[in-house]
Amino acid sequence: MNLIEIKNVCVRYGPIEALCSISLTIASGDYVAIIGPNGSGKTTLFKAILNLLPLTEGSISLYGTDVRRFTQWNKIGYVPQVSRNLHKGFPATVREIVASGILSAKSFPRMIFRKDFSKVIRAMETVGVCDLSNRLIGELSGGQQQRVFLARAMVNDPDLLLLDEPTAAIDPATREQFYKTLREINSQFGKTIVLISHDASNIGHFATKLAYLDKHMVFYGRFDQFCASPEMTRYFGPHAQHLICGQHCPMKGKL
Amino acid sequence: MSTILEALQYAFIQRALVGGVFIGCCCAFLGVFLVLRRLSLIGDGLAHVGLAAVGLGLFLNTQPLWVSIPVVMFASLWILWLSEKANVYADAAIGLVSAVSVAVGIALASVGRGFNVDLFSFLFGSILAISIHEVFLSVILSIFVIGMVFLFYHELFAIAFEEEYARVLGIPVEKINKILILCTAVTVSLGIRVVGTMLISSLIIFPAITALQIARGFRLAMLLAAVFSTLSVLIGVFVSYVADLPTGAIIVLTNFAFFVLTFIFKKMTQ
């Protein structure tokens, strides 16, 4: 089943073209990494998928429904791009932040009941943040915060997870651990994951597909195919091949 | 203690306490959201509008509160429209609307020379002079505002934390923003009676920032803000009665004292 279908999408900010002629299909069980240089339209693509931006051209369907008419947001978990200082001083506990994710499954009046907290605990257990339950969000490290936001995205047990640069504020060791957690969520729980990353060399070890974006879709396929493609050399240069693809392990995911 | 019991015998003290506590709680609950969303100075801007509206009410020889509530609500929507639709920064929109309002207020005060003394009481607040009708109106509107905060608590929390994420959750952010700003407008109109236009923003800001110093959770922050606000009204009313000092100023200074104490407590326990 196709969870996301993007057909010939263009997005413009006034006269500036952010994305053009993007077509992409993401099926259930995929683990897709979207890479590309700064300003290549990665975050814009996510915002278009989440109906936060109007499309200039083309169409996006989520679960077979046009995104403008889509209402089942509880089927999608989203981890936005965040900077660590953004939430400094905010008085919410980890449990309160994770619980707020439940709201997408509620209609007016949006109340969170005691029984909903079993979902909160399950999501925190899945990503390993139960011990942080009563800590304030601003007191956590970048890696811990990202895990909390992942738990918030997973609280409704969605089929699809969209993550915008979830490892931007964390150190390489924690980053690798984070990717492993995502790999487990993908393989053990069957969740579809779409992730934006600048970390082309590492993400290739974990994702099953790779999309290279530079305002248009440069490449979409398996990581080993990308390493062998002329686009790899054109965009990263002849010497980058070893750095990005050299230590690449064979992928174990579904293709 | 006997002085407090003696003070409680007076109807004007009872009215001041009831009205002040309800309005103070409204300010505290809304203040937590406004402070976290960097909108705390909206109280100051709307208070300027409130002063002009009170001037208009006195000029028209009607109950000032009946005029100020709708006028301040309209001004709050104007600020929201300027910042959301007209590409004016929120602080600039607040400045624009409050400056126009003060100009209107000055013009009205100049035309209707007879009510300048009454206008002065709204500038610095006069809760001890609050009438029984004003107390009823304050209590009813305060219950309404507090009810709205509790009804939309989760939406307000999600928007305060991350507005864009709240949209992804399917929350109608524009509608909730309107509700928040209209509730603030009503609260500011009521609060002008307690501490006056000069100090109303402090009634919104102080309990919130005091609670944020020590709260270990969002619900606790709301509760603590309400407690600090209530205590400052109680202390303010009794101290001003005993020492014959202006009530609004004492309420604000008590709030400031709570803030300093919690700040020191936080630094000592870190």
Image: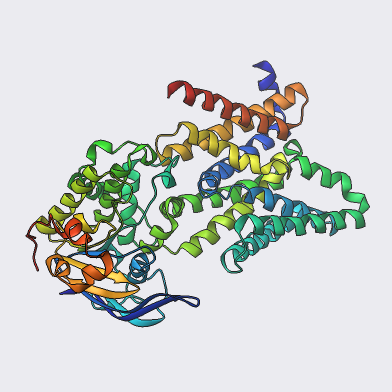
Q: Residue at x 34, y 45 (%)?
A: A96
In this rendering, would B52 be left or right of A188? Answer: right
Quarter of the figure with residue A60: bottom left
Q: Position of residue B257 (x, y in %)?
A: 61, 26
Residue A97 image position (x, y, % from top left): 34, 47
Question: Which quadrant: the C terminus of chain B?
Answer: top left
Q: Residue at x 65, y 34 (%)?
A: B17
Q: Residue at 70% x, 29% y: name it.
A: B250
Location of the N terminus of chain B by quadrant is: top right
Q: Is residue B135 above or below residue B239?
A: below
Say which of B22 and B251 sits in front: B251
In the image, A189 versus A247, the foreground residue is A247
Quadrant assignment, res B87? bottom right
Q: How is the image coloured?
A: rainbow
Q: What residue is at 36 percent from the left and 69 percent from the top?
A: A41
Q: Is B211 situated above or below A163?
A: above
In this rendered view, identify the residue nearer to me: A5 or A103: A5
Q: Left of B72 or right of it: where is A126?
A: left
